[in-house]
Image (tube, rainbow, N blue to C red):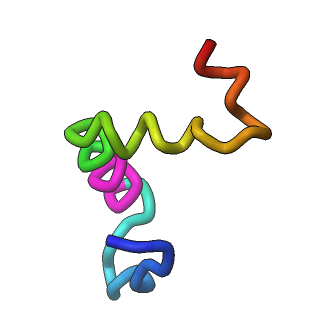
């Protein structure tokens, strides 16, 4: 994984890709929690 993602392959659906990536994030609570560490959104985690 990383910031840059590969483009959709021929016949691949965006919704399927998004669901797969969200499922991966769901399995990594540390990653999901890190999204809210920046000071501009830290208030959300209160």
Q: Residue furthest top?
A: 46
Point out the stretch of residues depicted in magenta. Answer: 16-22
- Magenta-highlighted stretch: main secondary structure? helix
Q: Position of residue 46 (x, y in %)?
A: 62, 12
- Left or right of 40 in this view: 14: left
Could you say which quadrant of the image residue 15 lies in?
A: bottom left
Residue lying at 47% horizontally and 42% vertically, measured from the top left? 34
Residue lying at 58% horizontally and 36% vertically, measured from the top left? 36
Could you say which quadrant of the image residue 6 lies in?
A: bottom left
Count of picture labels: 0
Image vertical order of residue 39 relative to residue 42, above or below: below
18 inside magenta stretch: yes
Could you say which quadrant of the image residue 16 lies in?
A: bottom left
Residue lying at 44% horizontally and 34% vertically, measured from the top left? 33
Q: Position of residue 24 (x, y in %)?
A: 25, 49
Image vertical order of residue 40 relative to residue 20, above or below: above
């Amino acid at each position: 994984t990383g910031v840059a993602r590969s483009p959709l392959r021929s016949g691949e659906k965006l919704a399927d890709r998004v669901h797969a990536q969200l499922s991966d994030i769901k399995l990594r609570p540390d990653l999901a929690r890190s999204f809210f560490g920046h000071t501009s959104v830290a208030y959300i985690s209160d």
